[in-house]
Image (spheres, helix red, strand yellow):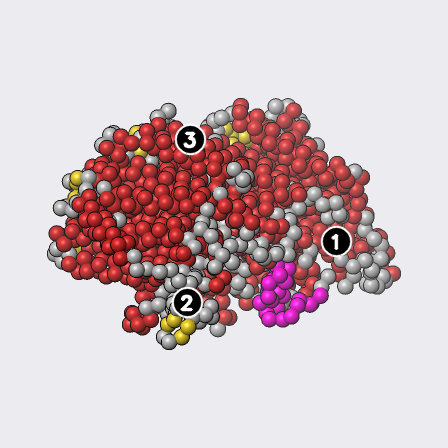
Amino acid sequence: MIPELHVGWVLFAGAIGLIAIGVGGLLMSRDLFRVVLALAITEAGANLLLVLSGYRFDAIAPIVTNEVGGVMVDPVPQAMVLTAIVIGVGVQALALGLVLRIYRAYGSIDVAEVRRRMDDDIAAEAGLPLPSGREKPAVHS
Amino acid sequence: MRKAAALLFTLGLLFLLSVMFLRFELGQAPMRIGKDILAAAPEQVGAANIVTSVVLGYRGLDTLGEIAILFTAATATGLILSGLGGGQRRDPEGGFILRHGADLVFPFLMLVGMYIVVHGHLTPGGGFQGGVVLAAAFFLPLLARPSRAVSHSALGWIEGLAGASFIVIGLWALTLDQAFMTPWLHQGVLGELFSAGTLPLLYLALGLKVGAELASLLAHLAEVEASE
Amino acid sequence: MNAIVLPVVLPLLAAFLLPSLARIWSSAARVLGPVLMLVSLCVLWTTWGEHPTPFVVALGGFQPPMGIAFHVDSVAMLFAFLVAGGALLMWPAWTDDDTMPRLAALTLLLVAAATGLALSGDLFNVYVFYELLSVASFGLVSARRTGAAFAAGFRYLVISGFGSVLALLGIALIYLRTGTLNIAHLGQLAPESLADPFGLAAFALLLLGFGVKAELFPVNTWVPEVYAGSSARVAGLLAGVVSKLAVLVVVRMLVVVFPHDETRMLLLILGVVGVLSGELAAWSAKDMRRMLAFSSIGQLGMIFIAFSIPGEAGWVAGLALVLHHLVVKSGLFLIADRWGGALQSLTGAARVSPFTAGLFVLFALSLIGVPPLPGFWAKLQLVIGLVENGNGVYLGALLVFLAATVIEANYLFRLAVAMYAEGASSTVTAPSGGNRIGAAIFAAVLVAAVFLLNPLSEAIDDLAVVGNDATGYMDSLAGGAR
Amino acid sequence: MSVLDQLLVFAFMTGAVASFIGDRRFAGTLLAILYFGQFLLLVKLAPLGYGAQPVVSAWQPALFGEVLVWRMDALGWYFALITVVAGWLVTWYASGEWGQGYRERGGNLGLMHTAVAANVVAMLLLLSSGNLLSLFVGWELVSWAGFLLMVMNGRESGGVSGPAGLRYITYATLGAMALLAALAIAHHASGSFEYIDLIDAVDQMTGPTRVSLVIAFALAFTIKMGLLPFHLWQAPAYAYSPGPGGAFLGAISSRVGLWGLAMVFGSLIGIGRIAGIELIPGWFDLRDVFMWVAALTIVLPTFTALRQNDARLLLAWHGIGQGGYMLLGLAAGDALGTGGGLMHVLNHASYQAPLFLAVFAVMHRTGTSDLNRLGGLVARMPLTFLVMLIGIIGLAGLPPMNGFVSKYLVYISLLRQGEPLLFILAVIGTLGTVLSVFKLLHNTFLGQLRVEHMEVREAPWSMLIPMLLMASVVVVTGTAPGLVLDWVASAQAALGLPVLDHTLGGAAGLDMLWVSGVLVYGFAVGTLLFLSGNKSRRVHQFDNYAGGHFLTAENQYQYSDQFYAGLMHHIGGWYRASFTWAESVVIASVDAMSAAANGFFRRTQAVFLLLLATLGSVAWLLWGVGS
């Protein structure tokens, strides 16, 4: 059991490490595209953790064949992870679309700059003085 | 300073997650419904691939939700990217090899994709995996010939009808006084192509939908890129 | 009984076909959504009438806990009803430009997801619907296609995405411990497998993950920008309706699976901080939309405080606050359609549209909780519930709540007084006819509720019994569980 | 349907009529008749004032398992009588020329009538509330109806009424929330909102619970009364209401706070128990806090009033100080004190309302209430002068007016209880009152008539009659205080307080019949002497000289600016400024907290907080509570 335990530990640690890397990326990235990537890494870690929650080494893939099989892996986490992955894909595609549009609107994908421009835009639309102190927001599409 | 704090908190998360998850050993999970499903799936659903039984049978609604999410993402991306530029493509045409290679590979990709889709209930694979291959088949010509406009209308009809047929197959059960998504075709023999009731039909719809969805997502993004 | 899936599935079906349908018959596509909402309302109404007691629909015919089940009780149906009704009144896709089909499709998806959240009895299925809800709302939020809308939508997406990861981790942890996903089944297993610090930590992860939509402190930093950047109707839909569904999910988990003092305390503390931060931030807001956004954070905080009270008292208070906030905040956001800008510009706005200003005052009065408006009765339930509990922390929450109400009265009526200021001429124009009618309908509901308080209070009492009945929830899983 | 129901329904109908036809020409008259109908119904309830059992409303809606009960007892009836009469007379006042003038100045007369009617309904609902829940409902209705009356005068007040009303409603909400807290504590202790259950439960309460209950009630009621340190809102809010509305508010509206305190001191908790809560054992208890607050409220706002140059503000500041006398008497707790305090409510209403109305009559004719721009109007508006004269004598608490009687009772009570310091403070307050009301009378009516007011006419009868009626109440109840003391005694009995032993002429050895008789006799003698001398000659006001100069229209011998400059120099303005300072500190701290909350939402790195929260809550659940 010892080697199995060891491998399991490595797998779990890998999943958790992915999450930590992703979260670190989320926190430290100043670039929106990197934020999307960090989010993707975090999701990957979470998905890995999810699929690990039903995995076992001594078992086979849950497909009924004519051969005599042993114990099968829990199929439910596999199905869940399939769903979670596809969800992640959808979210990431949308995020990329948004990054594209932000870049088109503001000419920058720097977190702080985008934040500042957004505040300005919201204030300008509401008819308030701009938080950044500029006269009026730059023209954008 | 901020980076240091970020690092610190990331390490904190690492620590907490380790505390929470490293206590578990692989294979020690109780597998309550997992065992039940493994035992019951071959009779109840009749699909050799039990993951497919779960994806389309036991957890079919999740799958419907998931294609809805893909559809939503595609629609939302289409919404936010529409009205951008005139779609003036400036990407150069692909070279001879790329163009003809793409033409050559296209039918094979289609074939592989469809194969994976329709055998989803028997072997590893299924609507998602096959759908992605199908999307690749559609996307390849796009890369080779950036000037050719994608027919969003056609893609829209495919994804709409495919999604609708998934739901309609599910709803048909209601007319038989069954719950939504109850398989209503004959189960057939385990392991054969035409088995597992409505599952292959669902996977077919799913595959088409996923393929069309991804293709339209990619096309939308590619168009913006091109109009850069 | 099986027809209860229709309010979830039909909007999906329509959404899939709508963009294509709009190409060939756009006027049909425009009315399709609202018509479907009416159909959903009818289906829910008849089902509610036929099945007053909770029942389970095993989707795909697979017995729960193996398959996904809809757990349908009166609370779930009430929330589903609110979703359809709210979406009907605040339908954001009446435009006739090229965005209409996609907007309508996204709204339908949002509605389907929200209804699914209300009905679903499976944890992972809830997660899927929650994600669907998120993605649809990202799209709707960014639909105005301004830079601010995109940036706000992206921020929302990142926070929400991280929240989803947390929720997924929570689900993984729970599945590791129990090996099941059905909420009722989880409830049965919880005393032996989840009633330790690690199970509670899983709840914290779920709470923070799903709390993003519920505007829970501190995962609500997206709220002000998103409501300021999106259209008034979308903001109203998100603040009024969608947030409540996320609350329902969290509270279901709390009541059925994690009914512990610690989890309630967590909810209470986050709710208290939410009330404080929201109302304080609203106090110095300079524009109406963000004022409403902050105020809704505060109100959601109150709802969390209410649900953290053990027993039926908490449910009575929580449900009353939920219903009240839904009506009032939706109405206010409809008013904010054209009046959402700088508060300064609203000085003298009562002259521009006395009707709208009157509605604002009515909503504000109810929000503060002036009797005999329904807001008062909702808040009274909260106060009684808090003090009945007797515990010191709950009394602290009561004090915070009372202080927050004073702040709320000040900033709402600062605006109301300015609206009626003499001699000033406002630059704003009256909200569009549709929005005025919508707001008037919400106001009419509010006023009608004053006269129907007695039956309403009885109905809420009944709903609270059902909502708080964790064993009833678990027992409805007859036969399938072990 | 009991008489109480009839009264409430009738009051509602009055409000409905006001809201539908309030801006018509005849509306004021019609409404005045309707108020008179309410008055008649109250007369029908008059046995309450002489010890009859409370009248219960048949309508008892149950909501969320709680019942709303309305029940009128002697105390409520006494207050309701003042309310309805005040509403009646101010509406009468507004029914004629004043209302027309108000409309011509751009005011919304219909709204004003509606607001006054709403105030009356709300007051009646509150005063007849039969349990804590209906008390709270009535309380909030009174607050918001008052708010409506205060903020509706934006045009005439030059936009000042809005901020004043906002300040009021913020304070009022604070009070309402305190009341809600009190309700919650009571519900927790007794399991219901019924008075009876609360009274039973008070004895079983733990010390902290009882203290917090008293504090919550006190906070709610003192804020409404405008007692220190929550008095800042009252004067501007009342002063800038439309005339009759301001008179109504100043006369009775804030007295519901006293009504509430009377219930707390009397039946609900009992002044004895409050005195039993010792803050510094053996030396200072909670009742002393009330008494000192009351005494300071008498003194400080009164001297603030002294500094006012706007007649409306001067009167409104006075109204605050008068509340102090009432509370002082009530907190004294014995038959004399509580009797004096309760009687002072009616007395105060009876002179505060005509004073306000007189000021507004002057404003109606001259267009100003600035005390530096008036003077000499006695020659032009003698009846208005008479009303104000009676009013200020009452306000100053001099015989033979009713204000003297109630203050006398309070003084005697204080002396008998051995509270000389409080007595001295009360007397100092009276001194300040005398000084400032003299300023009011002098600057308005005495001295030299200004050129621009040469053509001013007496106020019309539609305004004079209500004022004179009220003024006559001041004289009549001053001469025969027993009329009122009967009702006060019944109210005391209903509250379970010691009952005042009284005669028609007064109590505690005071016989106003005799005092008035002597005064009348003295005046008669003086008048006879004056007439018999017949040495007076009427001259034009410029046919005179002062300081060696002949007088012209530009050259005035009457000074009104810097009144009491010497006194002002000594006492300064520190007390009022200190409270405004305290208020601004509160606002600034809320501002700071608000900025902090905003900063939280404006963080660029949103995920950071999310992560922080996750770590915090998970760690808390893992180690904080689990182990």
Q: Residue D8: in sight, yes or no?
A: no
**Disc with the residue nearer the chain's start (2 vs 3):** 3
Q: Residue at x 57, y 59 (%)?
A: C344
How far, Cα to Cα, is label 3 from label 1? 62 Å
The quarter holding residue D378 reads bottom left
How far across and down, in percent of the image, does residue C187 sit? 42, 38
Asked if labels 3 and 2 touch by Cβ distance under 8 angstroms, the answer is: no
Using the image, tell me which numbered label, if any, was put on residue D529. Answer: none
Q: What is the count of numbered marks? A: 3
How far across and down, in percent of the image, does residue D468 sit? 36, 45
Asked if labels 1 and 3 touch by Cβ distance under 8 angstroms, the answer is: no
Residue D527 as seen in the image, left or right of residue B94: left
Residue at image mark 1? B82
The 10 Å Cα crowd at callout 2, few under 14, some 14 to 19, many 20 or more, is few
Using the image, tell me which numbered label, if any, was put on residue D9. Answer: 3
Is residue A134 rendered magenta in the image? yes
How far, Cα to Cα, is label 2 from label 1? 91 Å
* Amino acid residing under circle 2: Asp
Which residue lies most toward the bottom here?
D548
